[in-house]
Amino acid sequence: GDSVTQMEGPVTLSEEAFLTINCTYTATGYPSLFWYVQYPGEGLQLLLKATKADDKGSNKGFEATYRKETTSFHLEKGSVQVSDSAVYFCALNQAGTALIFGKGTTLSVSS
Amino acid sequence: DGGITQSPKYLFRKEGQNVTLSCEQNLNHDAMYWYRQDPGQGLRLIYYSQIVNDFQKGDIAEGYSVSREKKESFPLTVTSAQKNPTAFYLCASSTSGRNTGELFFGEGSRLTVL
């Protein structure tokens, strides 16, 4: 079945460092891809999405490009802030089905 | 404001007791979902419902039950048959059709079995 694999954390960075969180997927068909973020003690929020190959999703300085040839959707940010500390989830879905999540990657940014 | 409300935020249960977690949304969304979150496991789907009076089992439905009598409400009952119920439970909703991946989440309910 469909699945999502994320790099294991925690990822620990200093403020203004470059961030990459790897995400690869296995799916039949052409899924939509998502990144969600969970701040401490809260539910998840949609961070960005891409619905077809070569699409780039972006929001709040984060970017991810839907790469069908490598089945990847890596999350990047050029300069992280302390406020970016959270758990990041990669996810996919096919139309009409429920979202499938990766296991999450914890990011900790120190000043 | 539109959103999803889960209650209670914290809940303690003795072994052998059933407990019901509430989830209400005023976003007029057709689909609703329950996920369970455990450390290092990510989110796992328990049940989901795409329309009123209909729901489907997710990956870990054993020991749980749901109902969907109203569009706005999707309560989850954790029964005594659930072997390891201590977890963080998240409810979510979405519009139907191609946008089912854009989920709106509640703030979660943390259940602890004593």
Image: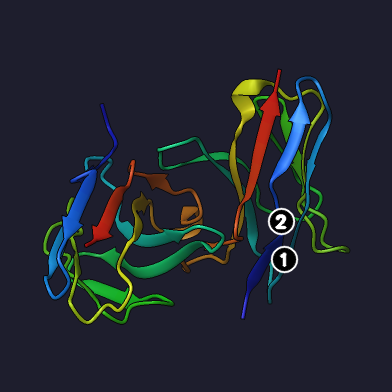
Chain name for mark 1: A
Q: Position of residue A83 (x, y in %)?
A: 60, 22
Disc 1 residue type (three-letter): Tyr
Mark nearer the N terminus (2 vs 1): 2
Chain name for mark 2: A
The residue identified by callout 1 is: A25
Describe residue A23's horizontal placement relative to residue B29 as left or right: right
**Residue found 49% across the figure and 48% down from its top:** B102
Classify residue A29 by image quadrant: bottom right
Q: Are marks 2 and 1 in contact (CB under 8 Å)?
A: no
| Quadrant in the picture for the C terminus of chain B | bottom left
**Residue found 80% across the figure and 64% down from its top:** A71
**Residue found 66% across the figure and 34% down from its top:** A108
**C-alpha separation, residue under disc 2 versus residue under disc 1:** 15 Å
Q: Nearer the viewer, residue A28 or A43?
A: A43
Disc 2 residue type (three-letter): Glu
Q: Nearer the viewer, residue A97 or A105?
A: A105
Q: Position of residue A1 (x, y in %)?
A: 61, 81
| Quadrant in the picture for the N terminus of chain B | top left
Q: Which is closer to the viewer, label 2 or label 1?
A: 2
Classify residue B37 by image quadrant: bottom left
Whether residue B74 is visible to the viewer of this picture, yes or no, is yes
Q: Nearer the viewer, residue A33 or B44?
A: B44
Classify residue B112 by image quadrant: bottom left
Residue sticking out furthest to the front: B114
Mark 2: few/some/many CA within 10 Å (<14, 14-19, 20+): few
Mark carried by residue A8: 2
Q: Nearer the viewer, residue B89 or A56?
A: B89
